Image (spheres, rainbow, N blue to C red):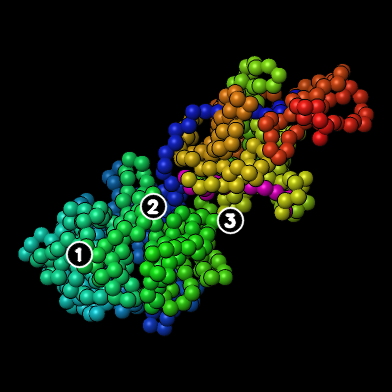
Amino acid sequence: MKKWVALLIGLTFQVSSRSVAQSYPHISELKGLEDSQNNTHLFYRYINPSHSCWSKSIYHLDISSQKDTLFISDYGIQVIPEWGCQGDYVNDYEFFNNDPSKYIYCGYNLDIDPIALLRRFDGDIQLEAFALDEIEISKQNENLVYVSAGERFFKSTDGGYNFVRNDSMQFIDESIISLSKNNDSQIYGINDSKLVRSQDDGRSYIVVDNSLWRNDSELFYDNDHSHIYGRSVAYNFSTHSYATKIYVSNDNGNPFTWSLLFEYDSKVWFTLDQNVSGEIYYSAGNKIFKSTNFGNSFQLYKQLDRNITGLYKKSGSDIIYASTPLKIYEITPDTIQVIKSLPVPSEVLNLYPLAVGNKWVYDYWGWWADTTWHGFSGITYREVIGDTVMANGKFYYKIYDPTTFNYPPILFERIDSSDGKLFRFDNTLGLPNDEYLIDDLFAEVGDSIWSSRHQYQDYFPFVCVGDGYFSKWGIQGSRKIFTIFDLTGYTYSLAQGIGIDSIYDTFDFGENFVTLKGCVINGVVYGDTTTVGVEDEETPITTSFKLEQNYPNPFNPSTVISYQLPVTSNVILKVYDVLGKMF
């Protein structure tokens, strides 16, 4: 049988910073409230970008009853093919007196033209506007409600049944963002990227901070009635990325009392305990940080397995709720518990389709360094040749795969469908469950994953460096790119519905490339799959002693040395260093 010691694969990758959370169904935000009985109600938005129009509805999770129901439909459908979509866009929602059954929300309805969407729990409210972006209810008087439509805003003094448009003076050029919880005569908005405040229904305003604020901003009010925190999120359409700034005022939002707490090159979520002065939290990536001194200093509080998409603190308790793309957690100082788990989308699992008979044929070329430098090229393949339950009781697929550093090239792999992680069985390493992680199919751009695709190692993480797009043989879908930043620079990509479509490696100081020539996925043939089958390969007869080059080389902490003998016999292998000293 031919021995493929290592095939080192490559391709020129086009990397973007678009997050996986924008490609697959996921939870995109989390809010909460405490009702009059101090029961927690969580509201999360679930985005499904695979829908033909849009689907980003809001769901209500009642913690006390464990009921999870559709709260507000944010959904579009294509009524007439090729005529576009119609439905409701929901931009903001609020509650009267913290009662989850008494709500009001705003946005716009898209039919032929957008028209304002304003709906109370007991019926629709008519308002002459194209689209509404923010709604605010007074904490002192629930009959006082404001709603904005860009630079215009409307006021209601009867709980949102009737609104009067304020045309006396242009207040702001973008949007109101907050009605002060300390004084409902104070309305905050954004004008010329500055934070402004009005105390006369918008007839005049003052600039309270001239930093760079975006219209997608929020204010949070501390229990001490002096500190106000601001979160400003900017979205870059060219790079599909976010940047967040967190501000604080130590004097009730008055001019020249604002300062920048920190900024972060991603989306940050913020929450506070409304009953405890100075206790605030924010999330960055998959980490939660806590401050008990109004943000003067932060400490790492908790870390989750995925990037956080929403954060809510149950005031007067030690409980935090956090969402990741597919889970909602209840977090205390001592525990992290999943209270809601959504299924891993099929689009994620299809990044690595495992089924008996699936086969991938590759072209490979490049430079391989042993005792002399020389070029090589050819065709190889990997194939799922069976399935079995291993000694640890888990089900695995048996794969012939010479594109790794394993020899013999027979692997046993499985996908955990509950979290999209891919594992490989190996009972020689002393690992828990006799397996190790080789891929995280739900990884987001920038994630560091302690995985081992080409060989087992625990000293360099793989990094998800980008999303891409695969288009070949009529297959079109997303693509995820991983790199290990060691001496090899091992980089590979997974294409949706295909699996590994390319690998690049600089092993032994030479560039090596492999690209997908064709494949068989679930019985369907794509491209050119012509090659020699595993069972048809020639098995050469060994007539002399042969010692193969070890791999990997250089190595840390282990290496593999292969040898051949013309006859069966006992062997003693001795290893010497460059000075002739035996190990």
Q: Nearer the viewer, residue 193 or 99?
A: 193
Label 1 belongs to which residue?
255
Which mark is nearer the camera, 3 or 2? Answer: 2
Residue 388: x percent and y percent?
74, 46
Q: Amino acid at mark 3?
A: Ser
Alpha carbons under labels 3 and 2: distance apart: 31 Å
The dot on residue 264 is 2
Give the residue furthest to the front: 579
Q: Amino acid at mark 2?
A: Tyr
Q: From what the image shows, is residue 6 above or below residue 209?
A: above
The residue positioned 61% from the left and 20% from the top of the image is 367
As helix, strand or loop, the secondary structure at mark 3 comes to: loop
Which mark is nearer the camera, 3 or 1? Answer: 1
Q: Nearer the viewer, residue 156 or 357?
A: 156
Label 3 belongs to which residue?
418
The residue positioned 51% from the left and 51% from the top of the image is 345
As helix, strand or loop, the secondary structure at mark 1 comes to: loop
The dot on residue 399 is none
Magenta-drawn segment: 433-445
Q: Amino acid at mark 1?
A: Pro
Residue 90: x percent and y percent?
30, 60
Q: From what the image shows, is residue 535 above or below residue 51?
A: above
